Structure formats: structure tokens, C-alpha cells
Image (cartoon, rainbow, N blue to C red):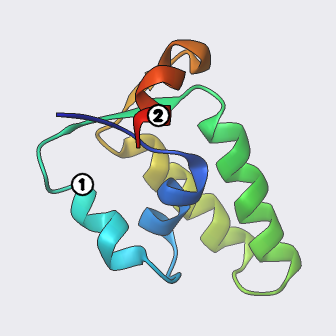
Amino acid sequence: MRRVVDASGAVKWLLREPGQPEARRLLDTGDVLSVPDLLFLEAANALARHVRLGEISELEAASAFTALELLPIQVEASVPLLPTALRF
């Protein structure tokens, strides 16, 4: 099965947030996890917000972003993902 994950879901893979266990389970399903190409920009913005709020350090944000880059995700152009994303 193919699943489309947005930035809010991806950030849950990286930081302790409500819904993190459910989001992390997606990584173990064996499903193809497709992410829009804008995900990295959106995730960086979310991580920066957590730094500004004092919830994580800059080093933790940088480490989280590196971890995101290493995840088994398939980066795709945003527009073609819309039909799949809208089904959920």
C-alpha cells in the first residue's frame, strides 16, 4: 500500500508529540511512504518553531532534520500526490 505523509506526520516521527506512537508505526508497516517535495521545507519550519518556543535546542532540531533525511521515504512532486492524499 502507498501512504502519503505530510510534514505534521513526519515531525511526529522525530519529536515527542501527541500521536507519535501511531505515526512511528507507519514506518514499520512496509508500506511505501510518499512525501511531497515541500515536506523538508515544512519540517524545517516546524523544527524552527520548536526551537523558538524553547521546546528543543538548535542541535536537537538539526539532528531531527538529519534523521528525517535518512528515513525510508519516497520524495515526490507535490501535485501528483494530491489524489492519493485526498482519499484519506
Residue at the location (38% across, 43% down)? 70
Q: Is residue 29 above or below residue 35?
A: below
The three-letter code of the residue at mark 2 reads Ala
Note whether 42 is above or below 63 in the view shown: above
Nearer to the camera, 62 or 28: 28
- Tell me if residue 33 comes above or below residue 82 in the rendering: below
Q: Is 73 left or right of 2, judged from the image as shown?
A: right
Crowdedness of circle 1 by 10 Å Cα count: few (<14), some, many (20+)? some
Judged by depth in the image, the label closer to the viewer, 1 or 2, is: 2
Find disc 2 in the rendering and name its residue: 85
* Picture residue at 59% right of the left edge, 25% below the top: 37
Give the side of residue 42 with respect to residue 73, left or right.
Answer: right
Local crowd size for mark 2, using a 10 Å CA cut-off: few (<14), some (14–19), many (≥20) = some
Residue at figure coordinates x 49%, y 67% from the top left: 12
Marks 1 and 2, how far apart at CA: 17 Å
Instruction: Indicate the secondary structure of the residue bearing disc 1.
Output: loop
Residue tagged by mark 1? 27
